[in-house]
Structures are given as C-alpha cells and as structure tokens.
C-alpha cells in the first residue's frame, strides 16, 4: 500500500474537477486546497528524514507502479484542460468563476503537468521523455526540457543559471528574470547543439523550432474549436502553470552559490547547493521534488528512491508552505536569509 501513497498527488486534479463542475465559490477550491489546506497539513504531519536501504531501492525500481503513477498524469491533465474549455465556453458564467477556473487548471498544469514532465524529462527512454514534453505543451513551456537538462543542471547555484534566485531577490523579480533568461538560454543551447551537429536552423533536429510550432498549433486548435475565449483560458492557465514552476525554482536554490576553485571553475554541484525538505505531504504531492538536493546530486535517480542528505540546507517548511511564504518577501527574507550559508553570500 505504501506504493500507492503517491495517488495523493491526484487529489489536486480531483479538487479541480469538482470546482469546474460545481463552479460558484467552489471554482476557487483548488487554490484553497493547494495553498491553505496542504500547508496546514504540513504543519500537522511529521517530518520524515528516513532513507531507504539499497535493497529497498532495488525493489522500488523494479515496481512499474511508480512509473504508471507518472504516466496517468497525461490523460488527467489533458482531460482537465478539455473539460475546462467546454465549461468556460459552453454557457455564460460570472467573471469570478472564469478566473477561479483558470487558476485551478493552471495549478494542475504546474503540479501534475510541469512537475511530472520534469521527472520524465530525466528518464533514459525516448517514450518517457516524449510523455514529459507532452505534459509541458499545455503550459507553453516546452523549452523547459532543453534549458533544464542542458542548462540548469550544469549551471545550478551559479550566477549563470537563470533558475537560481539571488540572495535578497524577491520571487516577483525572479519570475521576470528567470522566465525570459531561461527562454533565451534554451535557444542558445539549441543553436549550439545544431552547430555541433552541422545542422541548419530548419533542421528536424531544431527542437526549439518544433516546440514553437507545436505550441502555436495547440492554441490554433483551441481557437478553431473554442474561439477566443478558449484561447484566453488556455493562455492564462498556462501562465499560472509556469509561474507555479518558477516559484518552485525560486525556493529550490534561493541564495545558494557554488564557490569557485583555484582554477577559476565552479566547484561541482553538491548536496549543499539545493534546499531540501522532508515534510511528508509536500514530498508525496510533488513526487519527492522536495528532496531536490539528491536530485541534483544524481539527476538520473527516480523520484521513489531519492535520499535526504544531512549536508543539505533544510527548509523549515515544506515546499507548498514555502511557496506561500515566498509571496510575502519580507517574511521570506526573515525566515530564509539566516539559513543561507554565510560563505555563499556575495556582497
């Protein structure tokens, strides 16, 4: 039964479906659940720092249920988007309901879409990577696959990394710098890959070009079937989804920096260069993303066997709670600045 604990990650889309079906004030049930109820549960449930044994890890890796729990997100996410499109265009609704539905779908796109895409994007099989990219499509964030795998994991916790928040940088400033710098970085990485392969811009190997075409095609199909209102719903939901991702990016490496060695190169990524959280609710809902230090230490490890490292800086709260705190910069700085290792703070 422990294998099925990650079914809790599907409570978010279930709550979203309820909100979309009943509308009214329930249209806001998803943000209430995600940013009030889950943080409160994190305060109640204990922190679990226990790591599994090598034997248990081998056993977990052999159980396909962990993979299928990820794959199931694809029909769930697309089903919710399609249901949402029908609901907002089939009959008139109050503006506040429309906004609530877009926020709800956007939260699911961020958690069950981009977050799961992140896990699948690190897999070795092309089929799993394909599913990951498909989950990025509704959020219009397919470039994340390239920048994250070829950029972020190389440059994490350095000034060169768009997805590493600077010490004393607010989450709102980070949204702006990270979104645009990551997109630019993805194109630069893609062009470099093409040069290395001696391929032209219009080569089939230009994934960024095809990502752009796919995303535009996705919006075109929605326009043809659901009109301008459907496109507005799709775009705003996508923005909510990737802002959720960027908020997670913000808390994952906030203020942490890799030091330079005598050769002028940055030290390799260590356990101390990502914030870790062992709060069980956030761990389950986010498929162990909160054990981010181990993910960076060895990005090929699957979510079900990620470990907690004593050397990792520990967040006082789970990721969902920390995301709420990040929205209040003065409170965030008071809580987190004193936890950033002094030697990492650049004056």
Image (cartoon, rainbow, N blue to C red):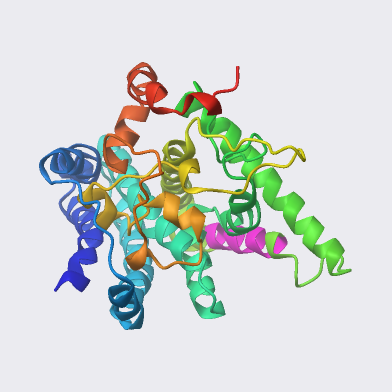
The verdict on residue 186 being magenta is: no
Q: Residue 298 vs residue 45: left or right?
A: right
Q: Residue at x 38, y 65 (%)?
A: 78
Instruction: Please name the residue shown 61% across and 64% down the image.
Output: 214
- Residue 201 found in image quarter: bottom right
Residue 93 at what x, y percent from top left?
A: 26, 43
Q: Main secondary structure of the magenta part?
A: helix
Quarter holding residue 2 = bottom left
Q: Which residue extends farthest front?
A: 262
Q: Percent from the top left, x then y, of residue 323?
A: 34, 36
Left or right of 55, for residue 138: right
Instruction: Please identify the quadrant where the N terminus is shown.
Output: bottom left
**Span shown in magenta:** 209-220
**Residue 262: image x %, image y %?**
74, 37
Q: Residue furthest left?
A: 44
Residues 78 and 54: in front is 54
In the rendered view, would you say 56 is above or below 308? below
Q: Nearer the viewer, residue 140 or 338?
A: 338
Relative height, residue 28 to residue 127 (above, below) = above
Position in image of residue 89 (x %, y %):
35, 53
Residue 71 in sight here: yes
**Residue 213 belongs to the span the image colors magenta:** yes
Residue 201 in sight in this render: no
The answer to whether residue 337 is above or below residue 44 is above
Q: Quadrant of the C terminus?
A: top right
Tell me the residue at 26%/37% (across/down): 317
Total marks in image: 0
């Amino acid at each position: 039964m422990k294998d099925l604990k990650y079914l809790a990650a599907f409570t978010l889309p279930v709550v979203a479906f309820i909100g979309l079906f009943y509308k009214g004030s329930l249209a806001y049930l998803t943000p209430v659940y995600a940013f009030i109820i889950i943080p409160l549960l994190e305060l109640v449930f204990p922190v679990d720092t226990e790591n599994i044994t090598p034997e248990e890890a081998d056993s977990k890796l052999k159980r396909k249920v962990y993979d299928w729990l990820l794959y199931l997100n694809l029909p769930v996410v697309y089903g919710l988007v399609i249901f949402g499109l029908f609901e907002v265009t089939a009959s008139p609704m109050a503006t506040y309901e429309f906004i609530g539905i877009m926020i709800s779908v956007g939260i699911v796109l961020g958690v069950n879409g981009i977050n799961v895409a992140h896990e699948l994007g690190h897999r070795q099989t092309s089929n799993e990577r394909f599913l990951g990219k498909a989950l990025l499509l509704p959020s219009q964030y397919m470039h994340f696959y390239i920048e994250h795998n070829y950029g972020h994991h190389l440059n994490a916790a350095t000034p060169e990394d768009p997805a590493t928040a600077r010490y004393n940088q607010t989450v709102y400033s980070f949204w702006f710098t990270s979104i645009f710098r990551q997109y630019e970085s993805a194109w630069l990485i893609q062009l470099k890959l093409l040069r290395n392969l001696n391929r032209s811009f219009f080569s089939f190997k230009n994934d960024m070009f095809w990502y752009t075409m796919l995303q535009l095609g996705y919006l075109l199909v929605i326009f043809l079937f659901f009109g301008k209102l459907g496109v507005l719903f799709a775009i705003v939901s996508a923005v909510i989804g990737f802002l959720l991702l960027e908020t997670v990016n913000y808390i994952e490496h906030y203020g942490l920096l890799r030091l330079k060695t005598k050769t002028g190169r940055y030290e390799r990524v260590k356990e101390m260069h990502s914030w870790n959280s062992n709060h069980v609710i956030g761990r389950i809902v986010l498929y162990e993303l909160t054990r981010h230090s181990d993910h960076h230490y060895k990005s090929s490890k699957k979510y079900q066997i990620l470990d907690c490292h004593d050397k990792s800086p520990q967040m006082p709260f789970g990721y969902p709670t920390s995301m709420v705190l990040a929205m209040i910069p003065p409170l965030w700085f008071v809580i987190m600045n004193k936890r950033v290792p002094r030697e990492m703070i650049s004056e």
